[in-house]
Amino acid sequence: MQGIWARSRGIGQWLTGHAGWCLAVSLAVHVAAVVTHPTHPLDLRVYREAAPHVLSGGLYDYALRTTPPIPRLPFTYPPFAALVFLPLARLPWAALVALWQSLSVAALVVVAVCAVRLLGPRPRGRRRALLWAAAGLWLEPVRHTLDQGQVNLLLCAVVLWGLAVPRAAPGRGAGVGLAAAVKLTPAVGGLYLLATRQWRAAAWAVAAAAAATALAWGVAPRESARYWSTLVTDTGRVGPVWSVRNQSLTGAVARLLGQDTTAAVVLWSVLALVTVALVRALRSAVRRHDLLGVLVAVELYGLLVSPVSWSHHWIWCLPAMIWLAHGPLRHRLLSRVALAWWAVVTVARVVPYLIGAEDRLVRPGAYPALLAWPGCVYAGCAVLTLAAVALRPAGHDRPVLADGKVPERDRSDVAGG
């Protein structure tokens, strides 16, 4: 085993030394794949076609007609998102697809660079980030996001840039707040600010989200009232919770046990256990000044406990893999196992294969166990990663500063030594 890791380390060092070329080759292959096998980004079409309805009314009556098993794709984001997407309606479709692809790939690079930055100063950090961006382009959640024209990469980049780059509290908090106003799931990033005692940044996150929501309410009061009063909790509009497309704990339990009372009790028990695991992970990561570990734990927890976490939501697998590979606990066996499991699941595209098998099922009926258990792969990876973050080495007991920075004498701790 040690020989395998030594060879892998040697290959990794060579690739890191040629990270720029690796990224260029990865981008070239991606462009060739897009040109020769063009996709049909349905989610981008929804953004583009639904957005004008925020001004004329009927935003949440709009639905793009598709094929089963999800024959209708409605607009499911808050009204502020429709305001953000309004300029998309003015662009020709081909130009919009090319622009969206370019922005999403650029966002992937930002995600990798900012994730490495949160690890702290370290040799060849920028090259490692470029290498991870080159590899991240082929992870299933990233591919799915690009194929569907999803906004996930852009929002992830906004959140990570805000947490990793600005020194002032308004900049650190505004990224989380604005991303949450576009799509609710980034709001879990607020737990990162609270865990690292960035009280002013957390207040700015709330203020930014509230201001964006108030702006949307002023422009579209009827649609805002409708969304925030009833639609915000209507998971049925999003899609079938039981589908293997949904990689949250709710989806996993629904496939394994159905959706009866017993399943509900089991689900709440599992959610409680995962919450305990999060608390332990945050306590351990904060004590060792592990900012990326804190963020990864928070974001994976959000994906686990959300009622619906489609596979393309799991782009946080890239920061998680960066932490497992380069974080302060990278030498632990559990970190190595979790990293290998993420790599196998995301590169081998396990979930799309399961989706294809699910679509061939004849429903209704009990969900086949042979599909239900493999369908827990992302949840399993997340739980393993939470457990890895929760490990606590001796001698890392000093708390993170209130502004989220690390004392100069402790920089080596954050960088993992």
Image (tube, rainbow, N blue to C red):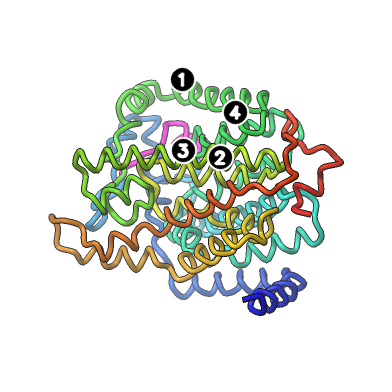
Q: For residue 267, which quarter of the picture?
A: top left
Q: Are marks 3 and 2 in contact (CB under 8 Å)?
A: no
Query: Residue placed at 55% from the left, 70% from the top?
Result: 30
How busy is the neighbourhood of tag 3: few (under 14 within 10 Å), some, or many (20 plus)?
A: some
Observer able to see residue 86: no
> What amino acid type should be assigned to the residue bearing mark 3?
Thr
- Taking depth in this image into account, of 319 and 217 the one nearest to the observer is 319
Q: What residue type is labelled 1?
A: Gly
Q: Looking at the picture, which amino acid does disc 2 mark? A: Arg
Nearer to us of marks 2 and 1 is 2
Magenta residue span: 74-86
Q: Which mark is residue 218?
A: 1
Crowding near the residue tagged with mark 2, few <14, some 14–19, many ≥20 C-alpha atoms within 10 Å? some
> Nearer the N terminus, badge 4 or badge 3?
4
| Chain-order first, disc 3 or disc 2 | 3
Question: Which one is earlier in the sequence, the residue at label 2 or at label 1?
Answer: 1
> What residue is at 47 percent from the left and 31 percent from the top?
80
Question: How much space separates mark 4 and mark 3, taking CA atoms?
Answer: 23 Å
Whole-Å distance between the Cαs marked 3 and 2? Answer: 9 Å
Does residue 19 appear to the left or right of 256 in the view shown? right
Q: Which residue is disc 4 drawn over?
A: 205
Taking the spot 72% from the left edge, 50% from the top edge, the residue there is 119
Which corner quadrant holds the C terminus? bottom right
In terms of secondary structure, what is the magenta stretch mainly? helix
Residue labelled with disc 3: 275
Q: In this view, does 184 lie above or below 244?
A: above
Front: mark 2 or 4: 2
Task: Report the Cα–Cα distance between label 2 and label 1.
Answer: 42 Å
Residue in the foreground of this view, choosing between 125 and 389: 389
Q: How far apart are marks 4 and 1 (CA)?
A: 20 Å
**Which circle marks residue 280 in the picture?**
2
